[in-house]
Amino acid sequence: MTKVVVAMMEHETNTFSPVPTPLERFGRGGFGVPTGPEVVERFAGTGTGIGAFLDVAIENGMEIVSPLAANAAPSGKVQAGAYAEMTDRICDAVAAGCDAVFLDLHGAMVAETTNDGEGTLLARIRSIAPEVPIAISLDLHANMTDAIVDNCDILVGYKTYPHLDMYEAGRHAGELLVRKLAGEINPVMVWDSRPILAQTLRMGHEDEPMGPLLEMARAQEAAGLLASSVFGGFPLADIWHAGLSVVTIADGDQRAAEAARDAILEAAWAERDEFVFDSQPLADTIASAKELDLGDVGPIILLDHCDNAASGGTQDTVAVLAEVLEQQLPDVAMFAICDPQAVAEMTATGVGNEITLDLGGKVDMPAIGRVGEPLRVTGTVRALTDGRFTITVPMGRGTTSDMGNAAVLEIPSGDSSVKVVVISRNNEPWDPGCFRSVGIEPTHMQYLILKSRIHYRAGFSELSARDIPCNGVGVTSSDNSLFTFEHVRRPIHPLDENVSATPEYGPAPA
Ligand SMILES: [Zn+2]
């Protein structure tokens, strides 16, 4: 019986984020980091990479060993102890003996002890078991390295953002490895990058410039390439190798893999200016949102993208909320301010009672030179919950979303109100369950403030009329001038001018 080690270790690290990343952050739903049979129980069949790997293993009659399924909301560098614990568990499982390894990874993990969380793990696995084939699935925001590509056999990235195809990417990678084990294919993998520090707001698969690049990858696979993956990269990781890359896998034909890779990279380079996001002043944006003729077309989304929890935001900045209250927009619901202290105060106050408190602004952001600025508000507590709900949209379908203890504060605004969901654990809104589980029906609102960037589209596109990016405050801003980049390789577009497509960099620092 083929014995396979199946694990998930996912974290997108924002090196500018002040939010800490201990091991505890990798558990959810009130449980710790699942291990052993609990991994299969909780993740088989779910809309995740590991869910697909487990399904492939089960369908092929493999014996499954699962040391862990760890996934944390993006934040600062993974603490040394957490990284050691997770990678030790995976490596111990491999060292105990196996025939194959399936890993659901992110590709942009930075730990206190390594700038390349995935590459360092894969190199270690290779040194333990040089002959054991490894398949991995990666996030579209992976920052690619030689260590990642050199130390696995099959690598498939998501082709969507929001990440609707996490399951498909895992299944794609898992099935290719099954075919390799059976001797049916001879995967040859190549990769390369271009010096583009692309902004994630410009990486939606429904938009240009990313959409057409992902379509090229799909077309290459339809024409016979084993896999073609485009990675926009994660620009808020200030590490040498951050940026856009392409990985292709052909069946025994290195030149075919290289040609496909280069075609996409050339197209990406031609569109490099389109990967830059331009923002407008916040007060102007909110004023024009207020003027919109709403009719009955569903809520308008005000996108508080500079403080996106799923890119390392503190999720407690209040600039957009304050402006909405200042201009008195009606019928607004917001997800969310992450402020455990405020939730505790609202819990003590109780549902139906009025409270005056300092909302948000508890966390300083030294990387952008700002201290936390709470908003003093008075409102009524409308709900208190344990903050858990089951995800129903394809992205993560069937898994538990855990926002920690949650509360709803209704603050008067104009003739109506703003209902703010206040939570205790960082949680990006992409499934409408984040509102419905606390008693708010999002389709009944005129405006939704979402601390998100693109993922909200997974569950909110269909029920909203339009979305408006709002230039708030936070460590996920798209304004590069707010950040001091010290480690990313230079020159790189758009931080530098007149960058060539293939600058001479010399070797990457160890
Ligand atoms: Zn991503």
Image: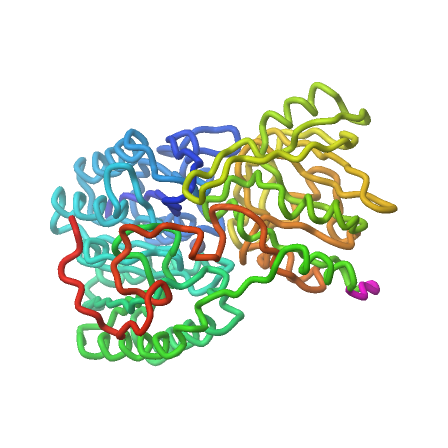
User: Which residue is at the far top?
Assistant: 348
Question: For this rendering, which residue is in front, 374 or 295?
Answer: 374
* Residue 83 can be seen, yes or no: yes
Q: Horizontally, is 120 left or right of 393 in the view?
A: left
* Residue 43 can be seen, yes or no: no
Question: For this rendering, which residue is in front, 483 or 164?
Answer: 483
Counting from the top left corner in percent of width and height, residue 502 is at 23, 72
Question: For this rendering, which residue is in front, 433 or 309?
Answer: 309
Counting from the top left corner in percent of width and height, residue 22 is at 38, 31
Q: Residue at x 24, y 42 (%)?
A: 114
Q: Residue at x 27, y 43 (%)?
A: 5
The relative height of residue 352 versus residue 279 in the rendered view (above or below) is: above
Image quadrant where residue 255 sits: bottom left
Q: Residue at x 45, y 38 (%)?
A: 41
Dominant secondary structure of the residues highlighted in magenta in the image: loop
The relative height of residue 457 versus residue 266 in the rendered view (above or below) is: above
Q: What range of the chain is rendered magenta?
A: 292-296
Q: Residue at x 43, y 48 (%)?
A: 51
Counting from the top left corner in percent of width and height, residue 74 is at 44, 44
The relative height of residue 99 versus residue 295 in the rendered view (above or below) is: above
User: Which residue is at the far right?
Assistant: 415
Counting from the top left corner in percent of width and height, residue 9 is at 35, 42
Q: Horizontally, is 264 left or right of 467 in the view?
A: left
The relative height of residue 449 versus residue 263 in the rendered view (above or below) is: above
